[in-house]
Each structure stands twice: as C-alpha cells, then as structure tokens.
C-alpha cells in the first residue's frame, strides 16, 4: 500500500442492508473494505459480499466499455455514443412500425445498487408510451404487495420489532439474507438482542436455519404447506379466543367468513398434512406472534394466500403499531409523514397493463407479471414485444424455465443489457453497457426507507440515514454509463421529454403528494443531482444528512403513533373472496408426491453469493451449484458429500455439488439460486436452478409459477 492510501466512510449497496463501511483507497482503487465501527446502528457489521467490494470493483472480467454483437455472434467494444445512436435508431424504427408497446424494460436487483436507474427507466417508458415495465419484485415476493391490496394495511405500519414480545418468520432467513423479517441493520445482532430480552421467536422453515437456531418454536414443515399451517394457526387462535376482539371489531371486516374458511384446518389435520408435531403447532398459535413471510413462503404456490393469512394473523392479534407507541418506520430522507393508528383500506389489486399469454395475465399490485415475459416475447405477432432494455437483472438465471428464457431473448430484434459483468444475459445482447459499481457512484439510504412500501417489516425501524459520494473514480481506460444516463441519452436522441415521478406510499395509499420533475433535456443530470431530486422533500434535508459521513440516527425526528382520525372509516379485510376461494382450493387439492423416492426441492440463499453475483470472484465463491441434502437421504441413495449429482424435475435437470446438511427436514433438497451460466456454456460454475422450473401452476394474479417444493429425483451425475 502506498503512503497516499486513505480510509473513507461509505456504505455497501450489494444488498438492501446498506451496511456502513470503511473503504481503504490507494492510488484511486479500493483495496480494503471493513465494517464501520463509527456507525453505531450496525455495530460495525459487514458480510463477505461487502468485504469483497474491492475484488468486485477490480475484477479483471468486469464489463468496462460498451460492447456490440458482431455478425459472427461475438462481442466487440464500441463507443458509447455510437451504440446509443444505433439503439435510438432501432427503437425509432420499431416504434414507427409496431408502436411503443413493442418496447419493454426489465429491471432486477441491481436496482438496489443504484435506484436512480429504474426511476429514469420508468420516465423513459412513460415518454415513449409503453407500460411494459417489469421488475424482479414479481418473481420474488409478489404476495407481499398483493396481500396488502387485498387486506389493506396499517397507516402506522407493523408493530415495532424492538418492543415485540413474539415474532413469527415464515420462509425467511434474515441472519443470512438480511432482507426480510428482522430490521436490516445487522439482523443477526438485532435478533440476538431481541431473544436475550425475552422475545419468543417462531420460525416456519423446512431447514433449521441460522435464524431458526434462535427460535422458541421451529416448525420444520413439509415445503409448500405454508397456507395450511397459517390457516391452522388462525384456527387455533380463533377457536381458543386468543385474538383481540375489540381491535378486530373496530378495524376489520370478514371475521365470520375467515372463521368459517379456516374451520376445516383443525390442529390434527394441519399437523399431519404439514408434517409438524401438533403440540408445536398449538404452542406457536398460543404464542401469538406477529407474522412476516419471505421467499420460502412465496415460491411454493399460493404465495399470495400465505402473505394474506399472515396479515390476517397480525390483524386478529392487533399486531400493528398502536396509538402512543413509537412509530417504527420514521421517515428521514422520505417526506414528512405522521403515522396514525388506523387502517388503510384494501384497494384494487389489478392495474392497466396486460399480456396476451397465460389467460391474459395483468399488471397487479406487484407490477407486471415478469415470469410470463418470455412467453409474451415468444408469442410474437405484430403487436408483440420486439425490444427489451434490461438493467441490473440477469433473466437467464432468474426467470423460470431457462431454455424458454434464452429462446425468447434470442428472438428479440433488440436486446440491450446494462450490467457490471458480461452476464449470461449480456452474452445474448445486441449491446451490453458496463455500469459504475457502488463505490464509483453517489448513493443515499432513501431507497431502503421506501422498502416499507413493499412489505410490512422491511427497511429501517430506526431513523437512520446516510449519504455517500463516489469514493473511487471509474477504472482507468473504462467507458462506463450510469443506468440513468443511458435512458437520458437515449431520450435525447429520440426527442423525448423525460419527467421523473416520485410516489411515496402503496399504490392505493400515499403518505405525501406525488411529485413530478420535468428534466431539462439539454443538461444530463448527474447521479448526485438525481439523489437531490429524489430527496427534495425529505423530512431531514439531504445537506443535513451529508454532515454525517458515517451515517446518523436522527432521533429528533422520531415520532409516536397518533390516534385514529375521527373521520377514518377504512376497514381491513379478513376474508377477501379471492383469497377465501384460494384457501378452499388448498383444502381440496392436496398435493401428493408422485414418484417413488422423490424429494422436494426448495430454494435458499448463501452468505457469500448475492443471487447470480459473486460466485466467480476469487475467495468469494462456492465452486459449483450447491445442493444440500439430509444425511439419511444421501445414505439411502448411496451418494456421498462432494459428489456431482443430477437433480431432475419433470421439467428439466441440473448438475450440482452435493452438501451434507443435517439441519434440513428429511425428504427435502435445497439448491442455491443464482449459480450457472447459459445453457450451452460449459465454462461456468454449475447450472441454474431455473432449469428445473417451468411456467406451470401459474398464480393468476402475480403470474409467478411454482419455484419451490418442486418434486425432483437426485442421482449420481454421469
Ligand atoms: N428458481 C428460482 N428463481 C428465482 C429465485 C429463486 O430462488 N429460485 N429468486 C428470485 C428472486 S428473489 C429474485 S430477486 C430474482 C433476481 O433476478 P435478477 O435481478 O434478474 O437477477 P440478479 O442475479 O439479482 O441480477 C442482478 C444483476 O444486476 C447487476 N448489477 C449490480 N449493480 C448494478 C447496477 O448498479 N446497475 C446495473 N445495471 N446492474 C447492476 C449484477 O451484476 C447482476 O448481474 O430471481 C428470482 N428467480
Ligand atoms: N447472502 C445473500 N443475501 C441475499 C440474497 C442472496 O442471494 N445472498 N438475495 C437477496 C434477495 S433477491 C432476496 S429476495 C432475499 C431473500 O431472503 P429470504 O427470503 O430470507 O431467503 P432465504 O435465505 O433463501 O430464506 C428462505 C427460506 O425459506 C425456506 N423455505 C424453502 N421452502 C419453503 C417453504 O415451502 N415454506 C417455508 N416456510 N420455508 C421454505 C428455506 O429453507 C430458506 O431458509 O435475500 C436477499 N439477500
Ligand atoms: S449484508 Fe453484506 S452485501 Fe448486504 S449491505 Fe451488508 S455488507 Fe453489503
Ligand atoms: Mo429477491
């Protein structure tokens, strides 16, 4: 390290935890990242993904300049201006011939790094006249938003984690994945503190996860039986009168219909069906928890129903932030908002957008139905999608049915990908643009505050905020294009006027009036300027937040929950007809394992990899798609740890490296999402789990197919 090396505070944006970090910068390059001990809210926490930011930034395989596909199929560097000219020309031609809805946009989790990109992408789509904007939310936890539309929500948000006496986590592992169920500022520490002060944690997961190890009750259910189990818990709570009748009477409709719908879900039936001890089920119900669901509850079908029943449970037990309590989601970089102890009524779950495939799937509270996008593209036709602009996503490894995805992307007239890597998806693109990584661009925590709008217990529960300027310059010799700049420059070339719209709230309810900013199309806004626009009406001025480079807890803006507005007539809905019909279906259609010796495959995350990012970095990688199995199941099949195995579903197969895992429920194989590469690429590290999935058992609201509890066989690989 040279004598000029210096240490600068910033925060990691590889996942939504946004951990504060100290970055050692030497000769313009990040060389070391550690947790920031001066950021008290996080206790100096970072994970291996954060500490590998220098490797990520200095990765020799990084996409450093725009690439264009050549006639022979290979990619060659091209100047950004020229690539943008060619793309603008192509889009103009497509729009003139087929209309603006021939153009679609997809943004994935890369949006967490740089939220300005999706905001500008939406402005671009509006100006062009297409509503075909898809995001990863619809292939992640669509039920989170859909359930809120159908049940309603609480003006002041969920009960605070810090003071709750019980907590129920369904299909989430926040100690590792950070993002669901426990406040994100060092969730492992927050959970430990909570359990130490006496919080009773209940975890529903087929695996004894790092989170489940702290549980008072761990219900190690048969995968996919979440709606059954949640209905069973509600059954017990209602049967034993453990709910809060006065709260329910004042704030919710549908108690009788819900009671009737859960009546058949007796403890005996539920325990047997979900494969859990009846005594544990009763103990869980009698502990009265506040429930939060995540991907485990989302992927095994009936995900909307699981999220919906979790909301019902919270309402039955009055587990919302109550009058006089400290408001758990204080706005700092969001506009001022006084939370009240009253409901937000349900609102229409469907929006205006619609596809032609799978019975005409519609836009819903979780956005456009992303999982069906490949089929929509493949349907073709004059009014079909011809161009896809993809930022911060890797559809080849994230959309269901990899073969279908690749066929669809190859069939497009134009595919443009913005990413930091030449990903499996970028390899199919006509143009791929390298983007700056987080240390090379400014950032603020406003996006994480806004996560509360897509679920009940995400984001920060403390008034925490941080701003960071760019810490290092882009790599020497690179020509990187910010996500937002890409859309701005394209709009300039297509004579489009862009207007940024900022909505703070759920689709049906906003916390403050939406704002619009008409951009000066002669002047490209920097990322700093875009952050200023996003925070223009913040409760704490951005300049004030900038005074604290290590971040700050703005205790002075903390609020208590105000009483219900006397004019409020909103009621929560415990028995939405669609959800009650869905519960009826669960009861009637019990799923049986078809094949002798089959296992149920479930998804999971691991600490060192963030979806499809990280397994190729030196020191941050598992060598090959990991598949975890219980030792009994391994022995029964004559398999051995470390061996390559073939995991085969009705739909496809993949090769994985076998790991022994005695924390798993027997009969379950857990495969890590995000590994692999293109189908025909032999160089990569294993196969994508999306090979095992197909557009089958498609949810009629979100369009999400079955991605979990998939019946598979596991055999030695050839
Ligand atoms: N079978 C199965 N399918 C799944 C899942 C599963 O568990 N099983 N999980 C689902 C879930 S929860 C999700 S969220 C989706 C994920 O779906 P995607 O978001 O499509 O996939 P990621 O692998 O997260 O891709 C993110 C990409 O963004 C890039 N990136 C990072 N920062 C930036 C940036 O600032 N700008 C740009 N332009 N790019 C950036 C990264 O290099 C990476 O290539 O997959 C879903 N699909
Ligand atoms: N380290 C790391 N962190 C990440 C990511 C990553 O890839 N790596 N990805 C990010 C993204 S995009 C997301 S969406 C979040 C996901 O965050 P989480 O949803 O917390 O994801 P997981 O850690 O996979 O936890 C899901 C759990 O569900 C369990 N499960 C599987 N099937 C079922 C079932 O049928 N029912 C129930 N009840 N449980 C089931 C699994 O065993 C697993 O423990 O994590 C984010 N953070
Ligand atoms: S948990 Fe890890 S990846 Fe997520 S923000 Fe913190 S250090 Fe970064
Ligand atoms: Mo996700």
Image: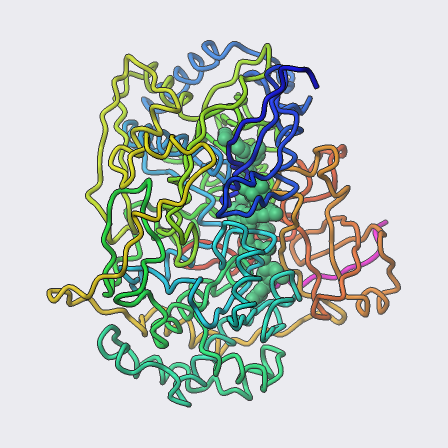
The image shows residue 259, relative to residue 27, as above or below, that is below
Rendered-image quarter of ligand 3: top right
The image shows residue 376, relative to residue 626, as above or below, that is above
The quadrant holding residue 706 is bottom right
* Residue 102 showing in the rendered view: no
Apparent side of residue 341 relative to residue 143 in the rendered image (left or right)? left
User: Residue shown at 29%/49% (left/top)?
Assistant: 505
The quadrant holding residue 679 is top right
* Residue 241 showing in the rendered view: yes
Task: Return the residue nearer the eye: 322 or 71.
Answer: 322
Task: Return the residue nearer the eye: 371 or 173.
Answer: 173
Q: Is residue 130 magenta?
A: no
User: Residue shown at 76%/44% (left/top)?
Assistant: 624
Task: Return the residue nearer the eye: 716 or 537.
Answer: 537
**Residue 508 spot, x, y in % from top left:** 25, 53
**Residue 495 spot, x, y in % from top left:** 28, 16
Task: Return the residue nearer the eye: 102 or 277.
Answer: 277
Residue segment shown in magenta: 708-718
């Amino acid at each position: 390290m040279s004598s000029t090396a210096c240490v600068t505070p910033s925060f990691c944006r590889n996942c939504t935890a946004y951990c504060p970090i100290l970055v050692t910068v030497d000769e313009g390059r990040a060389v070391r990242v550690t947790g920031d001990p001066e950021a008290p809210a996080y206790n100096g926490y970072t994970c291996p993904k954060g500490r590998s930011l220098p490797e990520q930034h200095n990765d020799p395989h990084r996409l450093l300049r725009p690439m264009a596909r050549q006639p022979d199929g290979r990619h060659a560097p091209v100047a950004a201006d020229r690539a943008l000219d060619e793309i603008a020309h192509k889009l103009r031609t497509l729009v003139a011939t087929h209309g603006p809805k021939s153009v679609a946009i997809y943004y994935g989790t890369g949006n967490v790094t740089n939220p300005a990109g999706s905001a500008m992408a939406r402005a671009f789509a509006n100006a062009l006249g297409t509503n075909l904007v898809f995001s990863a939310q619809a292939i992640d936890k669509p039920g989170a938003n859909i359930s809120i539309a159908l049940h309603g929500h609480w003006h002041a948000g969920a009960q605070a984690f810090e003071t709750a006496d019980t907590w129920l986590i369904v299909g989430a592992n926040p100690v590792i994945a950070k993002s669901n169920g426990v406040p994100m500022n060092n969730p492992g520490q927050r959970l430990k503190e909570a359990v130490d002060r006496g919080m009773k944690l209940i975890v529903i997961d087929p695996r004894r996860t790092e989170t489940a190890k702290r549980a008072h009750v761990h219900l190690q259910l048969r995968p996919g039986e979440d709606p059954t189990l949640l209905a069973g818990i509600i059954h017990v709570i209602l049967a034993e009168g453990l709910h809060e009748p006065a709260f329910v009477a004042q704030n919710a409709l549908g108690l009788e219909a819900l009671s009737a719908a859960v009546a058949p879900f007796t403890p005996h039936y539920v325990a047997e069906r979900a494969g859990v001890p009846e005594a544990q089920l009763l103990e869980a119900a009698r502990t009265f928890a506040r429930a939060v669901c995540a991907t485990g509850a989302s992927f095994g079908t009936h995900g909307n129903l699981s999220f919906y029943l979790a909301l019902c449970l919270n309402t039955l037990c009055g587990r919302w932030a109550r009058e006089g309590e400290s408001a758990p989601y204080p706005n700092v970089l969001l506009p001022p908002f006084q939370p009240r102890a009253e409901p937000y009524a349900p609102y229409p779950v469907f929006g205006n957008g619609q596809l032609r495939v799978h019975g005409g799937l519609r836009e819903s509270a979780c956005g456009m139905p992303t999982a069906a996008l490949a089929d929509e593209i493949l349907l073709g036709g004059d009014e079909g999608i011809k161009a896809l602009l993809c930022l911060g996503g890797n559809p080849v490894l994230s959309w269901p049915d990899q073969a279908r995805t690749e066929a669809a992307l190859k069939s497009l007239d134009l595919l443009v990908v913005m990413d930091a890597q030449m990903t499996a998806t970028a390899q199919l693109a006509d143009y791929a643009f390298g983007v700056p990584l987080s240390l090379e661009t400014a950032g603020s925590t406003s996006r994480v505050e806004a996560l509360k709008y897509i679920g009940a217990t995400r984001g920060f529960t403390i008034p925490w905020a941080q701003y960071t300027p760019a810490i290092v310059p882009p790599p020497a010799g690179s020509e990187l294009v910010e996500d937002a700049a890409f859309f701005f420059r394209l709009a300039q070339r297509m004579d489009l006027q862009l207007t940024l719209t900022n909505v703070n709230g759920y689709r049906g309810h906003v916390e403050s009036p939406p704002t619009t900013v008409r951009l000066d199309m002669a002047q490209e806004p920097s990322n700093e300027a875009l952050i200023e626009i996003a925070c223009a009406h913040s409760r704490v001025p951005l300049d004030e937040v900038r005074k604290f480079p290590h971040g700050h807890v703005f205790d002075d803006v903390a609020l208590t929950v105000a009483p219900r507005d006397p004019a409020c007539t909103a009621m929560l809905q415990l028995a939405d007809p669609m959800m009650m019909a869905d519960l009826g279906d669960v009861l009637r259609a019990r799923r049986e394992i078809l094949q002798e010796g089959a296992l149920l495959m479930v998804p999971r995350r691991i600490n060192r990899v963030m979806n499809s990012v990280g397994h190729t970095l030196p020191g941050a990688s598992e060598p090959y798609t990991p598949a975890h199995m219980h030792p009994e199941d391994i022995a029964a099949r004559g398999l051995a740890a470390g061996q390559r195995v073939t995991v085969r579903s009705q739909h496809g197969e993949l090769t994985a490296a076998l790991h022994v895992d005695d924390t798993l429920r027997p009969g379950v194989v857990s495969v890590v999402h995000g590994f692999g590469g293109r189908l025909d690429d032999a160089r990569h590290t294993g196969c994508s789990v999306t090979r095992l999935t197909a557009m089958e058992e498609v949810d009629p609201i979100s369009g999400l197919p079955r991605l979990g509890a998939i019946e598979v066989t596991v055999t030695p690989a050839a």
